[in-house]
Amino acid sequence: MAAPVDKVDLQARRRAAKIIHEKFKGVLKDVLSGKPPRLIIPKRTLANTRFDPEKGILVMGEDVIERELLNMGEARRFMQTLLMASIIYQALIENEYPTIRDLYYRGKHTIVYRDLKGRLREENTWDEQSESDAVIRDVEVFTGLLREDMLILSKEKGKVVGRMKIRSGGDVIDLSKMGHGAYAIESTPDLIEFLEVDAEFVLVVEKDAVFQQLHRAKFWDKYKAILVTGAGQPDRATRRFVRRLNEELGLPIYILTDSDPYGWYIYSVFKVGSIQLSYESERLATPKARFLGVSMTDIFGYRSKKPYLSERERRNFIIKAKDVDIRRAKELMKYSWFQTPKWRRELRIFLQRKAKLEIEALASKGLRFLAEKYIPEKIETGDWTE
Amino acid sequence: MPRRRRDTATAKAVVAEAPPRGRRQRSKETYREISVAEFFAKNRELAGFSNPTRALYQTVRELVENALDATDTHSILPVISIRIAYDEELEAKYGNPKKWFRITVEDNGIGVPPTVIANAFGRVLFSSKYVIRQTRGMYGLGVKAAVLYGQMTAGRPVEVVSSMQESDYVYLRRLYIDVSKNEPKIVEKGQWRKKGRWHGTRVTITLEGDWPRARSRIIEYIKRTAVIAPYAEIYFETPDGEIYVFPRLTSKMPAPPKEAKPHPHGIDLDQMKMLIKRSNARTLLQLLSNELQSVGTIMARKFLEEIGLDPNLDPKKLDNDSLVKLVDSMKSYKFRAPKSDHLSPIGEELIKIGLKRMFKPEWVDALTRPPRAYQGHSFIVEVGIAYGGGIEARNEPLLLRYANKIPLLYEEREDVTYKVVSGINWKIYRVDFPAPLVVLVHIASTKIPYKGVGKESISEVPEIESEIRIAVQHVARKLRVYLGKKAREAEARRKIITISKYIPEIARSLAILSKPPTKWNPPSEKDEKILVDALVRLVSRNVEVPKVPGLDHSDPEKIVRSVIENIKLE
């Protein structure tokens, strides 16, 4: 595949390929000089994940694993890591955009070897895609390159509309002229160039349906905003895109989710990163992201703050929290980035009331209430949680 | 067939006739002396003849053991043939097909003197010389019990054909046992001049039996006999016409047991009385130092003086109290341990040969422990362990128990051997059940401490138990060494394969990764080959290379290459 490639793309490819080549030079040197080769890879475990309060994100600890070819338990993974790296490397050089599924198929073949009794035996380089996906993560942490950096595609999930123009793959796209649709945030968000920006903030909504409603109400136009959704648990590209909006354009990021522990965790993923994959946080997390709502105080009020919901609405809209919600909330209370006074108050109220609320409940009060009162009022009065 | 056995029971037994019920009848109880033969006829389960199944098994066993005693005990390489056949004559007579059997066992032993045949087969507890040594038989009633059982169920006499080595004649006797008199009743006699040099004995007993039920035990019994007598040639023909042949594997035989005098620790009051009766000793001193083992004149004098008996006393004039005192004191006095040359262990080599033939194991070893004694009886424990190969994996060890070379098949769980073997933590020895493990335990003794009258299990005598444990653990430790080595080799094989098989894949990947991103051109076959060679060198030099049959061990690279020779990189 030799598609015409633009400059940004080409630069990204060269950079990634060079890093991979350099990283594996050591293995090559060892093999040629007769020294048992090993890969030193940062440990991708929960135990090796910590919160860096200075950066405000989850980072990997210092623990590493040494993956040695001559260790029986590691030989297979050693082979897989080299195999995966070589496929990615070749794809970068040959201007391809493999998906993780492509990588799985390209690397999957059968090794037919002989045992010591002379019988032929078979083994696949990998069997399930989950196996090759794990190897991709190993290559990421070993090289320090994210899959986006290595131009590996995944399913597009995030969407964006708003008052800005971008360039992608050589085309200029006006995100304010998407009709009822939206621009799908591409798997390689670093190849996007920001052109003209006429927005004052970014609103990230958890739910695709709410995104569509706000989009049709031209919320982003009226309030000079960029509207983003990750459609549930955000993918890496959406998170990287949001991070860039914040970091490169200095736009404040407001996150709107359901009022429940699951919604709060989505906020947490945008803000500090995912606990399982802390190595990506460095480039994907947005430590300055703000939780706009829906907060417990929006529902129940607090001191002088009046609730957005009447007694009657509360009775109709509130859902009783389940045991699993309670457990999750208690889990969140342990995380240091949920230790601010405002978050502690949120979680305390939740555990007292054992009540949760879906954001659609606010929309059902009337879309105008959500778009023209609730959101702007909260932003204006600084009623967010950090 | 001269069986040299020790009398341990008096020749007569006294039983009470069942008294009529009622309080006043007590004084009218009458006692009648019955013959030993009659006693055993009425209590045949005591000798193992409780039902047609056991009777068939027990008869084969008695005859085979007699046959072996007549051969290997006298340094003759045994040739033994066993034939069980349906007796068609009786079938025609009584109906009940497949119920009547003729059991014929023939050996090439020393033969039975013609004058002795009648008593040897027709008088219960007929005794031979008063000595102690290890033989297979027990009280000298086994074969007679079989004869009795045969005549009681099938009504046929036992038929004995025998010739001694030095004799020119072959003798035939057909006889019953007169139960009330405990006497042989000969119904047919014959003798012929020998044409060849045959010697030995052929015994035929006809009886009621149950072949389908006895079948597996009898076959097992014969197999297990063959295991510890690999120097014997054994033929076995079943009523269904199956033939089992166990050829001789070695002409090496265990040394025959020597006769020995009783040891003072093992003697009881009755034996002492008999000893005095038969002995020519004029004084107590002579009696002790001449008739007992491990007792010299000095020792005897010291002992007698200590217990306050005059060494010059005529033993025949001892009163009962002194006799009890003598026997009782002897048991606790510190005499030298009993000698063991009257024991005949099988020996490590024969155990190994026998186990190898029967199980075709991948590993076998055996141990004969030094002689030990319990209560004045010497004994030797021998253990053989076989592992793997043709042995079927089971959830516990297959246990082969022997007492004085007799396989014990029944009452396994009652046996001290089972207690010891099942109590061993086999994991320590790298045996993980289910495992292909056979444990053979032989106890040779002048007196086997059987648990019950069935003589199928051995009591938990502490000295014996401890010897068995020591012996099993000793051989098991060798097994552990073997299994450890095997596991390490298997590990080495797994390792070399696990690593080697990835060499081509790694070489190709590295070849790609080694090409700089600028001025890219795909790696050539030569690039890959250089890396394959480097990796083969690396692996073969740094990983322990196992021994592989058919491959040159001096060139580990060849072994690595043999793993990957089939792999082609597309």
Image: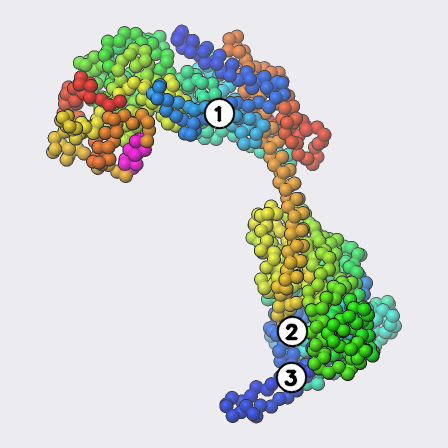
Q: Chain of mark 2?
A: B
Q: Report the magenta stretch's main SS.
A: helix
Mark 1 Cα within 10 Å, few/some/many (few <14, many 20+)?
some
Q: Pointers 3 and 1 in contact (CB under 8 A)?
A: no
In the picture of the structure, the residue carrying the numbered disc 1 is: A64
| Rendered image quadrant of residue A265 | top left
Q: Which mark is residue B47?
A: 2
| Residue A330 is inside the magenta segment | yes
Q: Which residues are magenta?
A: A324-333
| Residue appearing at x 60%, y 20% in the figure | A31
Task: Give how far across and how far down residue B333 sits, in percent.
Answer: 71, 68
Tell me which amino acid carries mark 1.
Val
| Residue appearing at x 55%, y 26% in the figure | A68
Tell me which amino acid carries mark 2.
Ala
Task: Give how far across and how far down residue B144 sits, in percent.
Answer: 70, 76
From the image, which quarter does the C terminus of chain B lie in?
A: top right
Q: Please, is residue A222 above or below residue A258 in the view?
A: above
| Residue A5 is inside the magenta segment | no
Q: Secondary structure at mark 2?
A: helix
Q: Secondary structure at mark 1?
A: strand
In the picture of the structure, the residue carrying the numbered disc 3 is: B14
Tell whether B200 sits left or right of A306.
Answer: right
